[in-house]
Amino acid sequence: FSLLQGRLRHMLVLLLLLWLHGTDSFYVPGVAPINFHRNDPVEIKAVKLTSSRTQLPYEYYSLPFCQPTKITYKAENLGEVLRGDRIVNTPFQVSMNVEKKCEVLCNFPNKPVTLTVEQSKLIAERIREDYYVHLIADNLPVATRLEFYSNREEEEKKKEKDVQFEHGYRLGFMDGNKFYLHNHLSFILYYHREDVEENQEPTYRVVRFEVIPQSIKLEDLKADEKSMCTLPEATGSAPQEIDPSKENQLLFTYSVHWEESDIKWASRWDTYLTMSDVQIHWFSIINSVVVVFFLSGILSMIIIRTLRKDIANYNKEDDIEDTMEESGWKLVHGDVFRPPQYPMILSSLLGSGIQLFCMILIVIFVAMLGMLSPSSRGALMTTACFLFMFMGVFGGFFAGRLYRTLKGHRWKKGAFCTATLYPGVVFGICFVLNCFIWGKHSSGAVPFPTMVALLCMWFGISLPLVYLGYYFGFRKQPYDNPVRTNQIPRQIPEQRWYMNKFVGILMAGILPFGAMFIELFFIFSAIWENQFYYLFGFLFLVFIILVVSCSQISIVMVYFQLCAEDYRWWWRTFLVSGGSAFYVLIYAIFYFVNKLDIVEFIPSLLYFGYTALMVLSFWLLTGTIGFYAAYMFVRKIYAAVKID
């Protein structure tokens, strides 16, 4: 039998090797490399204009740039639409490995582009608001190279500069009260030559896309009949000013330069992703891990030792004599499982928390495996939306079972509440914010058809699945509580000041927030400053730490509460476990004041609107984790004690 097993194993390995050999190499769907031959067209597309000062993206042709004869928009996925991407073709003519010194972009070289007063005002306003233009070539975003000297010794300074890249290129710049537009773009594209057979034509792959934007006055750009132009000397040229009070004339020009690179196609995104200092990240993550596990260990030891002592004492008392007066958590055994007020709302919120937990866990895990890389635009958001809809089954199941345990009877109403309470709040806030974005004519506004599609997903996928899960959860045996509940509720003694809910929230939130606050900085930078977020391995680790720390803090808090003879722990545990959401809100306000340069009303409204959604979701997530940990703990300790 073992010989047969061995042979089968060998055959499987052989088949796998043959399959791998046959497929050459494996690529995630949608991000396979494109091979170019010399002179093949490399299409330059525009994505959007963004600014971290206004948080309002605009589509490329919202400004009077040169347009191709036919404008075609790329079909986009849900994530791209929600991000405000509107990918469109441009008139730039770029061919693989073909240099261009200087070429006029619009088709009439002798006739410069005339900007009306309205257009000039709009461009000046966008320059003042610090807008960046985002282009892509072969799905690679354009980047501007920034070179600067680091704080090293003087001798080393002469040797090397530090190079960093920023996404996109600046639309223009200001000098005093004057506005200057970057009207000449020098594209630098890097290619990697692929290995081919001797008699075959060489193939190339695009591995980097850089731009050097320049502002050159109309008089200094000498254009001829063939749309060719000559660039002035760097020292003697004046920039192209845009005067918002009158019409302006200018030429849009570009040049193309190709360079060979050793970078392989598979690692072409590394340039864009190594923008932040990784050492800081490693150090802070390890620091968080050590601190959290150290504190968790101490908490676990204290709780386990105290509990063992408690349980031994209670059981010993029962054996010897009942004359000793009972005190502590055993005293409330007849009330600890008394159903709380509003059991339907509690179970609905916990159901949504389970839905969020499953969605976040799967998204982070899949992203960690590299399947949601930044190269597949909008994939992360699309996946998150669909997963949230499909996780409704689990949310409904857990909510239904808990609702039945809490002596609830109206399961249909409970299921409807679970399916609509949290998503309804999210949809309501997003709709109000969307109205403001529509008013600004930004591409960040979700189009009406997409909104209808999201509503159809909510009522067509999520709602039926929640009902299905709720039905099975409600039919299942309720959770088995180890002690019976008394008929008459016990009087609760007066509580000390530190047993106050708000004090509990402040105390319970510190540990989970401390574990994840460094990661929070990177996530905020990705959302509000148009950075790429790619450290999903770190994020997965942080998520595990968050789950562990939330569970332990919740157990400690519920233990102290029961020792104080207060048995109303259901709602309180849910609120207190989500205490770290309060610190996330404080951090978001700090980030807004210190890191962002937002001054206008609508961008501020957007920031705080989306922050409110993040804080609400985070509170549901951490509250749910803490609640289930505390519930398991309470059932365990009362099951271990002998009760008459």
Image (spheres, grey):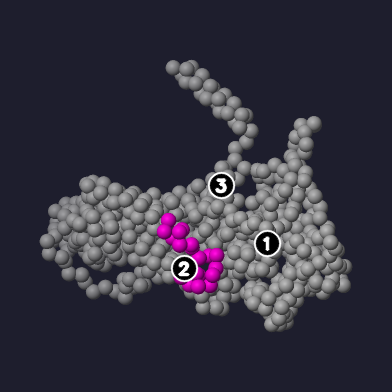
Q: Is residue 492 magenta?
A: no
| Residue 262 to residue 141: above or below | above
> In the displayed structure, does residue 345 sit left or right of residue 579?
left
In the image shown, does 28 or 541 lie closer to the viewer? 28
Residue name at image x 57 percent, y 66 percent = 57
Graded by Cα atoms within 10 Å as few (under 14), some (14 to 19) or many (20 or more), the crowding at tag 2 reads some
Residue 222 on image: x %, y %: 85, 67
Question: Mark 2 is on which residue type?
Answer: Asn
Q: CA distance from mark 1 to mark 3?
A: 36 Å
Question: Mark 1 is on which residue type?
Answer: Gln
The residue that label 3 is drawn on is 370
In the image shown, does 355 or 542 lie closer to the viewer? 355
- Looking at the figure, which quarter contains the N terminus? top left
Residue name at image x 70 percent, y 73 percent = 115
The residue that label 2 is drawn on is 434
Question: Mark 3 is on which residue type?
Answer: Gly
| Residue 217 to residue 412: above or below | below
Specify start and end residues of the magenta stretch as a single range. Answer: 434-453
Q: Secondary structure at mark 3?
A: loop
Residue 25 on image: x %, y %: 62, 36
Label whose residue precedes the other's in the sequence (1 or 3): 1
The residue that label 1 is drawn on is 67
Q: Is residue 634 visible?
A: no
Secondary structure character of the magenta stretch overall:
helix
